[in-house]
Image: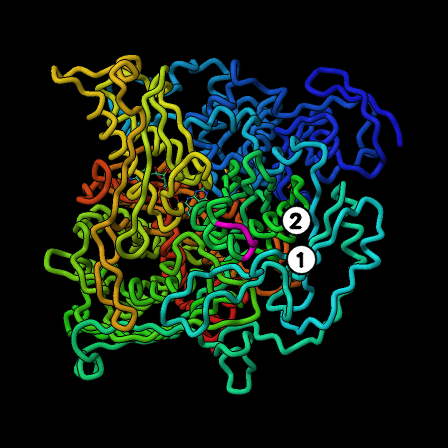
């Protein structure tokens, strides 16, 4: 132990600590400065950045022995306050630069140090700075962050005033389509937005800390679990194994009727078998996290290792044993049958192309690792706080397994540092529930980044073979598809995912005849969870690359071939229904000049490019908004003494659920003459908010937007007096009228047939057309994306900052999917860097987005969703651009340098 004096945000603080504890831990745990966030804990992400003696310092890797006595430290709390934000914080807000907000304090700190050194940086200098200081953001695509720094520097140089920058709200005017700032932005930029780990530090003193005993192999029988030694370790309160779980110990994966299993293969705590690396075998509950961790190492697990099937083909091999005894490894089958038999048509087609495609196990890589806590409340209800983006659905999936009646289990979403879909699956909710139920004490569980990466769901790999036939003019006649989905060992949401193959392979084009078959396979690799795009990035990769192959075979331009075939009046989608709107021809018309310029630029550069080759490629981006069939959502609106309260369960990953709810309710309630700040948002707490469905499938803006709109309309109607004016709160009380009104909205859709894929599953779709420019280094095989140009149609834009942010962020994740991201190797792919997360220099600053706003008949105020479309096919456009640059056709992602080099070698041999 030693004592040091630190000048933290200008105040002298005495710190007693051990030499090896980190500065981040001291700031957070001892000085209670929770604005400093810990993401990776390994110096890779910059979330924990502080300024120490003038230098940006990643506080998670600086041990106290290296912190000089009397060091001057600035944390986010020392930059500005909610009452008096710093210009950098203002600039962050007006540029929509804080989405989930987890990286925000670190970036703002880093920016402060940059601007202290250089008050007039160029954009490239800003990018260099963030690259050097390893500030990583998973949400924003980085461009808005650079915009924010440029605005902040102008403000600080006195070239613009705060008033020039801030969004100006005009009373009575609509907020729709504006750059109004989301309600949570101020708390995020000042470090006051409390994520799960922050709330964890504020739990009562008797809180028990959970650490997990996890599987270190991918497939095994469990022979015995011996906790006797661990139980004797200091501070240990209890060790929980499957034997202690009060319920069925199974999570309900909500299997489709034709799933060959019962969908309940995932244990809360493993009993008979280990199905994948990281499976939770036991929970150690202790007074402190370190005591719990020390005891974890003393739990002895005896296993009999079994062959691990780490991919679908391995699990489908004839001699493979059943991963879940009694259920075949190929456990769900689906298909598509549209129009006539394709075999005869293919035979007669003037042009036929076919190829194999693979899109892999993309890791989500949110900067905030999984975290949550639970307790029993005064009414005997079990309350679980987590990053859940489907609070009601998750309660239904875990209650029986935990052993609590559903009505006694309430899940609350904590402020969440990004999920990108992994939290569409329950993760630690059931573990927390079991621990709190057994101990009757508050319990806390936080993953580190290694656990986050190795033991949460991943994008499910698709192995695809696709064939396209066209007539002599390039009109598509038929498509044949075959796809195999590796869903890891647990089926949850995988049956639905597998049906995406029929819905999205070939989507965007009018293809009269489609035949295909898809199947879902248990393996021992990471379980499949939803990932932004949910099957469309896999499906569209095959058809968007194959149509380029067709264009090459026909020697026609890829854009014009697409133009000939995209949805028009009279077209049908792969599921055989009318598209929601016809907008792709207009979007391609807008894209054409951009595409031609990009092609010309590449050709010009190639004249004198040496080893570097340049190219431009394109793709159509497309995804649906909504879950299949009669998807439904609910909300309420209530008049209060100070305004209106709105309640819904529109979970917020960071995408902007608060802004969507506020804008839509304000639009309805404007006639009351209230201001946006009089609308109180009550969100994502099962104790208070109704079942609005999960925030997945880019459904919330449409589904919960509509439900919220209906609730507000119902309230407005109730407030309306016969003379057309509106009752006040007091008048409602006097007249004894109800104060709260519900709203519900159900999509006018039908669930497609599982065998034929035919039906009308979605109320809305989102569309994009994208041009990508790349540079390929033919010596190293490395591809660099140099420019992205997107024309997007998400219907009416509800909030421009939010939608821009969704587009930039989704495209950046597409670059990762195309070039670097993977979770395959359990030794290598275990860190953010190892998994290939894009840093700022991997994403171009040159990203342009323009919009076509085709009104959606089913969307609130004509809006569709936005979140997933930008990640549906940018990787296809990148791969098409690589082909344009150097003639190498990559069909299996990621397009790592060695694959490009191998392709070049094959061409030149
Ligand atoms: N929006 C809008 N105008 C439109 C359409 C949408 O202003 N015409 C806004 C909405 O109000 C909402 C956002 O855009 O704030 C996304 O809306 P929507 O597409 O309906 O998606 P959800 O709200 O259901 O959010 C989920 C979606 C999905 S499925 C994933 S995965 C995802 C995503 O959004 N994960 C994200 N965006 C993310 N963004 C961040 N920062 N972090 C994640 O984990
Ligand atoms: Fe410190 Fe990631 S760099 S938390
Ligand atoms: Fe940067 Fe979410 S806003 S990680």
Would residue 820 be visible to someone looking at this image? no
* Residue 301 highlighted magenta (yes or no): no
Question: Residue 577 falls in which quadrant of the image?
Answer: bottom left
Q: Nearer the viewer, residue 779 or 301?
A: 301
Question: Which region of the structure is painted magenta?
Answer: 401-405
Q: Position of residue 88 (x, y in %)?
A: 52, 23
In the shown orientation, is residue 691 left or right of residue 507?
Answer: right
- Residue at point 84%, 24% (across, down): 4
Residues packed near mark 2 inside 10 Å, few (<14), some (14 to 19) or many (20 plus): some
In the shown orientation, is residue 602 left or right of residue 148?
Answer: left
- Circle 2: element type: helix
Q: Nearer the viewer, residue 464 or 255?
A: 255
Decide if ligand 1 comes within 8 Å of the CB at mark 2: no
Please give the residue where the numbered disc 2 appears in the rendered image: 438
Please give the residue where the numbered disc 1 appears in the rendered image: 244
Q: Position of residue 438 (x, y in %)?
A: 66, 49
């Amino acid at each position: 132990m030693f004592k040091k004096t630190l000048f933290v945000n200008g105040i002298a603080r005495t710190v007693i600590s051990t030499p090896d504890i980190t500065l981040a831990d001291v700031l957070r745990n001892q000085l209670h400065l929770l604005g400093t966030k810990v993401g990776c804990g390994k110096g890779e992400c910059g979330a924990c950045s502080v300024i120490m003696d003038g230098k940006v310092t990643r506080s998670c890797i600086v041990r106290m022995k290296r912190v000089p006595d009397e060091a001057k430290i600035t944390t986010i709390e020392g930059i500005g306050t909610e009452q008096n934000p710093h210009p950098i914080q203002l600039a962050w807000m007006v540029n929509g630069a804080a989405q989930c907000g987890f990286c925000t304090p670190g970036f703002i700190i880093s920016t402060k140090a940059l601007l202290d050194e250089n008050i007039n940086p160029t954009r490239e200098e800003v990018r260099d700075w963030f690259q050097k200081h390893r500030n990583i953001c998973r949400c924003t695509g980085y461009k808005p962050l650079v915009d924010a720094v440029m605005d902040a520097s102008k403000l600080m140089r006195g070239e613009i005033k705060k008033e020039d920058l801030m969004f100006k709200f005009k009373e009575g005017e609509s907020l729709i389509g504006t750059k109004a700032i989301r309600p949570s932005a101020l708390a995020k930029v000042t470090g006051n937005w409390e994520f799960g780990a922050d709330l964890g530090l504020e739990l009562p003193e008797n809180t028990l800390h959970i650490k997990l005993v996890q599987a270190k192999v991918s497939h095994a029988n469990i022979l015995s679990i011996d906790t006797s030694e661990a139980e004797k370790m200091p501070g240990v309160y209890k060790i929980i194994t499957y034997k202690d779980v009060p319920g069925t110990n199974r999570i309900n994966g909500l299997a489709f009727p034709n799933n060959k299993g019962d969908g309940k293969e995932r244990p809360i705590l493993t009993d008979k078998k280990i199905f994948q690396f990281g499976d939770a075998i036991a929970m150690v509950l202790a007074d402190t996290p370190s005591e719990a961790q020390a005891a974890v190492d003393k739990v002895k697990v005896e296993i009999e290792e079994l062959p691990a099937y780490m991919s679908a083909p391995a699990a489908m091999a004839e001699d493979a044993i059943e991963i879940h005894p009694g259920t075949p490894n190929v456990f769900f089958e689906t298909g598509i049958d549209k129009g006539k038999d394709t075999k005869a048509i293919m035979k007669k087609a003037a042009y036929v192309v076919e190829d194999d495609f693979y899109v892999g196990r993309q890791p989500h890589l949110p900067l905030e690792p999984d975290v949550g806590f639970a307790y029993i409340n005064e009414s005997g209800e079990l309350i679980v706080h987590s990053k859940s983006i489907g609070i009601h659905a998750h309660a239904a999936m875990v209650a029986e397994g935990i052993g609590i009646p559903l009505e006694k289990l309430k899940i609350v979403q904590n402020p969440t540092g990004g999920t990108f879909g992994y939290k569409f699956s329950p993760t630690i909710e059931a573990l927390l529930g079991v621990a709190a139920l057994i101990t009757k004490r508050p319990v806390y569980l936080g993953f580190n980044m290694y656990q986050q990466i190795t033991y949460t769901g991943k994008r499910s790999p698709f192995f695809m073979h696709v064939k396209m036939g066209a007539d002599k003019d390039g009109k598509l006649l038929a498509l044949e598809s075959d796809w195999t989905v590796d869903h890891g060992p647990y089926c949850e949401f995988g049956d639905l995912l597998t049906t995406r193959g029929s819905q999205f392979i070939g989507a965007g084009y009018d293809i009269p005849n489609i035949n295909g078959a898809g199947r879902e396979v248990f393996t021992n690799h990471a379980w499949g969870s939803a990932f932004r795009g949910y099957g469309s990035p896999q499906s569209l990769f095959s058809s968007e690359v194959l149509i380029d192959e067709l264009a090459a075979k026909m020697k026609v331009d890829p854009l014009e071939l697409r133009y000939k075939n995209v949805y028009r009046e009279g077209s049908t989608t792969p599921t055989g229904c009318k598209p929601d709107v016809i907008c792709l021809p207009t979007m391609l018309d807008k894209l054409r000049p951009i595409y031609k310029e990009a092609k010309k630029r590449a050709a010009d550069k190639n004249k004198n490019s040496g080893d570097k080759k340049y190219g431009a490629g394109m793709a159509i981006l497309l995804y649906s908004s909504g879950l299949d069939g009669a998807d439904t959502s609910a909300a309420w609106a209530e008049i209060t003494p100070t305004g209106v309260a709105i309640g819904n369960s529109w979970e917020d990953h960071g995408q902007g659920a608060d802004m969507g709810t506020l804008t839509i309710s304000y639009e309805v309630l404007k006639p009351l003459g209230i201001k946006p700040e009089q609308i109180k948002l009550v969100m994502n707490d099962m104790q208070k908010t109704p079942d609005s469905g999960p925030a997945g499938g880019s459904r919330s803006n449409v589904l919960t937007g509509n439900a919220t709109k209906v609730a507000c309309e119902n309230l407005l109607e109730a407030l309306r007096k016969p003379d057309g004016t509106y009752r006040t709160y007091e008048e409602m009380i006097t007249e004894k009228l109800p104060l709260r009104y519900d709203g519900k909205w159900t999509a006018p859709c039908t669930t497609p047939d599982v065998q034929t894929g035919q039906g009308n599953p979605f109320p809305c779709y989102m569309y994009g057309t994208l041009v990508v420019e790349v540079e390929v280094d033919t010596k190293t095989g490395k591809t660099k994306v140099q420019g992205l140009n997107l024309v997007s149609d998400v219907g009416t834009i509800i909030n421009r900052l939010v939608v821009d942010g969704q587009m930039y962020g989704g495209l950046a994740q597409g670059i990762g999917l195309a070039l670097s991201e993977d979770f395959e190797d359990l030794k290598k792919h275990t860190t953010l860097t190892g998994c290939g997360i894009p840093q700022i220099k991997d994403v171009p600053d040159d990203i342009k987005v323009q919009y076509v706003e085709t009104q959606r008949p089913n969307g609130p105020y004509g809006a569709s969703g936005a979140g997933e479309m930008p990640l549906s096919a940018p990787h296809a456009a990148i791969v098409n651009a690589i082909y344009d640059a150097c003639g190498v056709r990559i069909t299996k992602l990621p397009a790592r340098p060695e694959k490009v080099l191998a392709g070049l070698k094959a061409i030149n041999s």
